[in-house]
Image (spheres, helix red, strand yellow):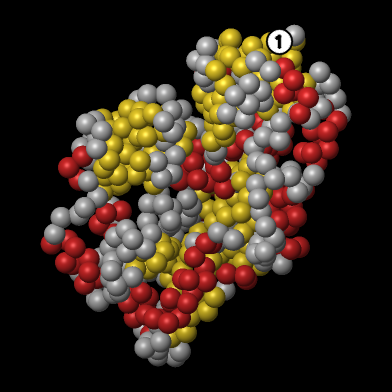
Amino acid sequence: MTSPATIELRKTSLNPIHRRMGAKMVTFGGWDMPVEYPATGGLVAEHLAVRSSVGVFDVSHMGDILVENDRTPGGALAAVQHLSMNDASKLAIGQAHYSALLYPEGTFVDDVIVHRLGEDTYLLVINAGTREKDFHWVRDHVRGFACTARDVGDDFTQLAIQGPRAADVVRKLTDANLSSLRNYWFTHATVCGLRNTLLARTGYTGEDGFEIYVPSDPRTSEMAWSRVLEAGKEFGILPCGLGARNTLRLESKMALYGHEISESINVWEAGLDRFCKMEKTEFIGRAALESAKAGRIQRTLVGLEMIERGIARDSYKVFDEAGREIGYVTSGSPAPFLKTNIALAYVPPGHSAIGNTLLVEVRTQKLKARIVPTPFYKRPKH
Amino acid sequence: MDSYPNDFRFTKEHEWIKVTGDTATVGITDYAQHELGDVVFVELPKVGTKLSASQSLGTVESVKAVSEIYSPASGEVLEVNQSLAKTPEQLNTDPHGSAWLVKMKLSDPKEIAGLMDAAAYQKYIADPKKEASA
C-alpha cells in the first residue's frame, strides 16, 4: 500500500458520501473510488444483490464526449462514423449502442457507448482511465469534419441502478414510462425531481438496469444518490463498488479496457465482430481489419472454469496439456453468483474448442481449467 | 480496543503468533482480513514443512486480491487448519480464534522478542504511513 501522493487523485462528487458510508477506497484509472462497502455486506453481498434484486453504483468517473455539428447537417454523424466501428447511422434519436474507437491498426483506443441525443448530436460515454487519451483522439480526428467535440465528463454525476428490481426502483423516481424504454434506449425525463435528466437503459452488469446522468454539483449528486437508496430500501438495495462491478461484468463476459481489449488487441481477436460494421462507410481501423480478416487470427478470447482448486488471476500464464505456454489470462476471479473460479484468456484458435482442458499457472503450480461457453452468466428471460 | 489479544505478537505483514512453550499458533490479524475483504481461498503448507522467519507460509485470497502469508518465526509445521479449505470465510469472522492457520514447533523462540506486542501493533495499523500491505 505504498501510495505516494505525487499524483493528485480525482474524486467524484460523491466521494465524501462513500467515505461516510465506510467504503473501502482504491485508486482506479487515476480516480479515488469505492471498491466495496464492508459496512453493508461487502463485495459478495453487493454482487448477489445485483443478481437477485438491485444495487446502485457511482460511475461518475466515466467520461463523456459530446459531438455536435457546427450548423452543417450531418457533420457530427460523419465524424462519429469515421471515429467508431459500429454503424451510428442506424441509431434513432433516443437510441444507444456499443462501439469502439480504433487505431489504424484495428486495435482499441477504447470501447464506448454511443448515444444519439438529437438529430445530429451524439454523446460518447468512455472509460475513466482513458478519458484524456480518448478526448484528444476524438478532438484530433474530428478536425476535418463540420462538427465540434467537447469533453463534458465533469458535468455529470452518473449513477447506475442495476438488477432485476432496478425498474421498480427507478419507477418511483421518474415520470418516464419505463415499460416503453427498451434495452439500450434512453429518454430525457424528470428523475429524482430533476427535469430533463438523461435516463438510459444501459449498464455493465449483465442485468436489466438504468444509468442516470445528473448535474455533478455535490448537493444535487448527494440528493440523487440518497433518493435512489431510499427508493430501493424496500427491495434491499445495496451501494456497490468497483469490486462487484468487475465480477458482475466478468460473469457476463463484458470487455474491460486494458484487459480483454487494448491498443495491442484487435477487434477479431476480442470477438467483438458483431459491433464492427465493415459494410458501412470508411472508419479508422477498417483497412487493417480487412486484411487481418483475410489471414488467420493468432489468438482468440475464451472462457475458462478452473477444474482444480485455485484462482486464475489477471496476467497468469496459460499452457496446453503438454505444458507449452500458449496464452494468458486477461481477467480472472472467483465468480460470486456462479460459485466457481472463472477467467477470460487469450489462446491460439487451435486450442480454443469448448471442453478443452488447459493449464493455468497459479504461483508454483499448473492447475487444470476447462474451456466453457461464454457468457458464463446469462440473465433469465422474463 | 482489546480485539488484539495481549498474549499475541504481531508482524508488520499482519500475521499474529501465540507462543506456548516451544510451540506456537499462527494466523492473520483482524486488520488483515478487513483489508482483504471476503476470503474465498486459503492455501497452507504441508505438515512437516520447515520454515524460516519471514518465509512464505501460504496464501489467503479474497475475491479481489491474493495475499502472501509470511511465517512470523522459524520452525516446523505441526498442524494445519484443515477446516479453512471448506470454510475460508471463518477468516473474516474469527481471525484470532477458530481461523488460525498453522501450529508450529519453534526452532528459535527468542525470535518472538523482535515482534510487536498488541499495543505496538495497534499503533502501527493506525499509522497511515506504514509501508507494509495486507
Mark yes or no: residue A163 visible. yes
What residue sits right under mark 1 in the picture? B22
- Report the front residue among A286 and B121: B121
Which image quarter: residue A232?
Answer: top right
**How many labels sit on residues?**
1
Residue A269 image point, x, y percent: 27, 54
Vertical relation: B86 (above or below) A84: above
Q: Residue at x 67, y 41 (%)?
A: B132
**Most extreme residue toward the left, as rendered?**
A294
Q: Is residue A371 left or right of residue B120?
A: left
Residue B108 image point, x, y percent: 68, 18
Vertical relation: A257 (above or below) A165: below
Q: Is residue A72 left or right of residue A230?
A: left
Residue A281 image point, x, y percent: 24, 76
Residue A380 image point, x, y percent: 40, 36
Q: Is residue B87 left or right of residue A349?
A: right
Q: Residue at x 22, y 40 (%)?
A: A352
Q: Residue at x 28, y 63 (%)?
A: A276
Q: Quadrant of the C terminus of chain A?
A: top left
- Report the front residue among A327 and B40: A327
Determine whether the residue tagged by mark 1 lies in a helix, strand or loop. Answer: loop
Which image quarter: residue A322?
Answer: top left
Mark yes or no: residue A117 visible. no
Vertical relation: A77 (above or below) A18: below
The answer for which chain carries disc 1 is B
Q: Residue at x 36, y 84 (%)?
A: A74
> Of the residues shown, which amino acid type is indicated by label 1?
Asp
Q: Residues within 10 Å of mark 1 (few under 14, many from 20)?
A: few
